[in-house]
Every structure is written in structure tokens, then in C-alpha cells.
């Protein structure tokens, strides 16, 4: 598995240091608000798991799984909900946890949905941001790292469901795609 990696973009240490800092800021910003921290499965699961351990205030967690509809509707940003939240978000302060923002379409759909469900506030935290490919204007409220416009894997991010278990984020060797 490690042989398939061309370059390590972000080491385990860099990632953990950044998460510690993000946890501190979130704990400050959400003091007294009992935020509902929502993980967008599956990619954000490792980030979510490490982040909540750095949040030092009361909070609750929930999970959502979504997938894009066929190619024709990708551009509309319409997504299919595969696993919905357990409880109502009405009146709750929501922190949406993502692995990476690329076009922004998935998150913009989720933002709309949570506002329609009458959340008190919705903010976005993403570990990685690739701002070069946006199809819709969307800015994360908290971001770990801005990454170049390359396909990255590891720490939750997959290629064909593989590499999610790497403890760091790396760039795949081109032959992995072509073989
Ligand atoms: P978008 O912002 O385009 O709606 O969707 C972002 C999703 O596309 C991410 O949650 C992730 O699943 C996938 N994605 C985007 N860029 C990358 C990348 O560089 N590597 C991997 N593994 N997935 C990506
Ligand atoms: Mg994701
Ligand atoms: Mg994926």
C-alpha cells in the first residue's frame, strides 16, 4: 500500500498538530452552545474522530452519508442521502465536518438542507480545501490545510475505497490509476 504513494503531502504529525489547534478554536467559539458536530461519511471519519478528542466543551455527534446522483445531476449539486441524521437539528448549532472541499456542491446541498430543517447556525470545518475547482462559491469557516489541485489519498480519503487507512495524506503514483 505505501509503495503506491508518490509523495507525502501532510505527515501524521502535521495533521495532529493542526487538529489540536482547530479543537482549541472550536472549543472557544462554541462555548455554552452544545454544538451538534456532524461527520460526513466516510472520508471525514478519521478527522472527526481525532477532532472531537480536542474539543473540550460539551458537544454531541451525529453522522450522515451522502452520494452524488449520476453524472447529469452532479452539476446541480443534488445528492442522495444514504444515511440521515438520528435526531432533529431544529434550533441546534451545527458544525459540519468534511474531509475535503473540491467543487463545493456536496456541502452546499447539505448547508441548504440543514437550514431548511431550521438549524440555529451551520458552520463548516474541512481538513483540506482545494479552492481551485469550485463550481459554487463556498468558504469553510475552519480549514486545516489548502492543498494543490491534485488527487490526494489517506487519512480517510480514498481511491476506489482504498488508502483511507493511511495515517498521513499523500499523492498517488500515476501508475496506480492507469494499471
Ligand atoms: P465536492 O466538494 O466536489 O462536492 O466533493 C468533495 C468530495 O469529493 C470529497 O468529500 C471527496 O469525497 C471527493 N474528493 C474531492 N477531491 C478529492 C481528492 O483529492 N482525493 C479524494 N480521495 N477525494 C476527493
Ligand atoms: Mg467528504
Ligand atoms: Mg471518495
Image (tube, rainbow, N blue to C red):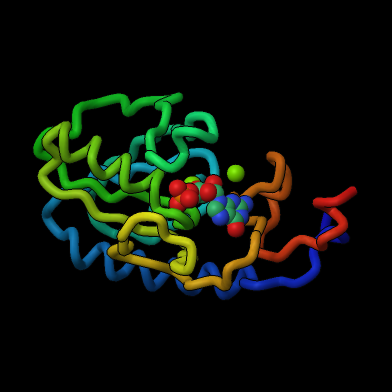
Q: Who's the residue at 48% across and 30% down the image?
A: 69
Q: Is residue 15 above or below residue 178?
A: below
Q: Position of residue 96 (x, y in %)?
A: 32, 48
Q: Who's the residue at 33% across and 65% down the image?
A: 142
Q: Who's the residue at 49% across and 54% down the image?
A: 99
Q: Is residue 134 above or below residue 97?
A: below
Q: Position of residue 121 (x, y in %)?
A: 15, 49
* 141 to the left or right of 39: left
Toward which corner of the image does residue 137 lie, by quadrant? bottom left
Does the rendering let one see residue 78?
yes
* 163 to the left or right of 155: right
* 141 to the left or right of 65: left
Query: From this viewpoint, which residue is outermost toward the front?
Result: 72
- Count the marks: 0
Q: Position of residue 68 (x, y in %)?
A: 48, 34
Does the rendering let one see residue 44?
no
Q: Position of residue 12 (x, y in %)?
A: 62, 68
Q: Nearer the viewer, residue 139 or 11?
A: 139
* 133 to the left or right of 56: right
Q: Who's the residue at 70% across and 55% down the image?
A: 166
Amino acid at each position: 500500500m505505501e509503495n503506491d504513494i508518490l509523495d507525502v503531502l501532510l505527515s501524521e504529525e502535521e495533521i495532529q498538530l493542526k487538529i489540536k489547534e482547530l479543537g482549541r478554536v472550536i472549543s472557544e467559539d462554541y462555548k455554552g452552545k452544545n454544538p451538534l458536530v456532524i461527520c460526513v461519511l466516510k472520508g471525514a471519519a478519521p478527522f472527526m474522530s481525532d477532532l472531537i478528542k480536542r474539543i473540550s466543551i460539551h458537544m454531541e455527534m451525529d453522522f450522515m452519508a451522502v452520494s452524488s446522483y449520476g453524472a447529469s445531476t452532479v452539476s446541480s449539486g443534488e445528492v442522495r442521502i444514504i444515511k440521515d441524521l438520528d435526531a432533529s437539528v431544529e434550533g441546534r448549532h451545527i458544525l459540519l465536518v468534511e474531509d475535503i472541499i473540491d467543487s463545493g456542491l456536496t456541502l452546499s446541498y447539505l448547508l441548504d438542507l440543514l437550514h431548511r430543517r431550521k438549524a440555529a447556525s451551520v458552520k463548516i470545518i474541512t481538513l483540506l480545501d482545494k479552492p481551485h475547482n469550485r463550481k459554487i462559491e463556498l468558504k469553510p469557516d475552519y480549514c486545516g490545510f489548502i492543498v494543490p489541485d491534485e488527487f490526494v489519498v489517506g487519512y480517510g480519503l480514498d481511491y476506489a475505497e482504498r488508502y483511507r487507512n493511511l495515517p498521513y495524506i499523500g499523492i498517488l503514483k500515476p501508475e496506480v490509476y492507469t494499471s
